[in-house]
Amino acid sequence: MKKNQQPTANTQNLTPKTQKLTPPNSDEYFMRIALSEAQKAYQKDEVPIGAVIVLDNQIIAKAHNQTETLQDPTAHAEILAITTANQFLSSKYLNNAKLYVTLEPCLMCSGAIFWSKLSHLIFGAFDEKNGFTKTQNNLKSGSIIHKKLTVKSRILETECVAILQDFFKNKRLK
Ligand SMILES: [Zn+2]
């Protein structure tokens, strides 16, 4: 009897582990899609930054940086993703939605995140130069992000840093 029961027990133990390898709703899963958006930007010779907006585990917007293509300094991945999500939902607010972005948002994008009432911000790499956390420290007064916004960082950080480093290294070589 014991010999018959053991395989069943083993299978049960394996199932959750196998599922953990490819969870379709994890932060890593959505960040990988943001990274594939960053790759699209790279191919257009744009600074490779990608963003994804998720509501109830469903992607409602994907975008990548297009400041060169559109000759528009506001065409950051986050702004384009937020606009797409607003249009998709026919709503100016994105309550309960999650924004995944490969690089820490700048001050402009933090403003857009604030006004759109996004619930979660998840980013990969920190932006030492233009990221909002540094700007916020310099402001010394209040918070530039919404108090109800949950922030997570360093999701797939290595990959998010690598694509940017690779892009700027190739730029210098050209
Ligand atoms: Zn920005």
Image: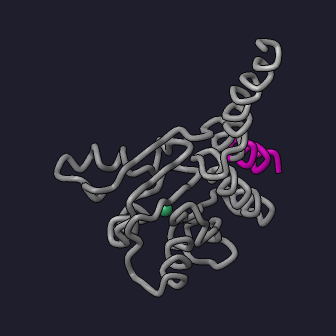
The kind of secondary structure the magenta stretch mainly shows is: helix
Residue drawn at (56%, 55%) of the image: 101
Residue drawn at (63%, 68%) of the image: 62
Please tell me whether residue 150 is drawn above or below residue 79 in the rendered image.
Answer: above
Please tell me whether residue 4 is drawn above or below residue 56 in the rendered image.
Answer: above
Q: How is the image coloured?
A: one colour
Task: Reply yes or no: does residue 167 show up in magenta.
Answer: yes
90 relative position to 57: left or right: left
- Between 158 and 25, the one lying in front of the other is 25
Residue that lies at the very extreme toward the left in this rendered image: 141
138 relative position to 17: left or right: left
Q: Quadrant of residue 92?
A: bottom left
Q: Position of residue 39 (x, y in %)?
A: 75, 57
Task: Reply yes or no: does residue 172 show up in magenta.
Answer: yes
Residue drawn at (47%, 87%) of the image: 90
Tag count in the figure? 0
Please tell me whether residue 97 is drawn above or below residue 24 in the rendered image.
Answer: below
In the picture, which quadrant includes the N terminus? top right
Q: Position of residue 105 (x, y in %)?
A: 47, 55
- Between 29 and 142, the one lying in front of the other is 29
Residue that lies at the very extreme toward the top in this rendered image: 2
81 relative position to 115: left or right: right
Q: Position of residue 11 (x, y in %)?
A: 76, 28
Q: Position of residue 116 (x, y in %)?
A: 37, 72
- Between 150 and 50, the one lying in front of the other is 150
66 relative position to 133: left or right: right
Query: Which region shows up in magenta?
Result: 164-174
Residue drawn at (54%, 56%) of the image: 100
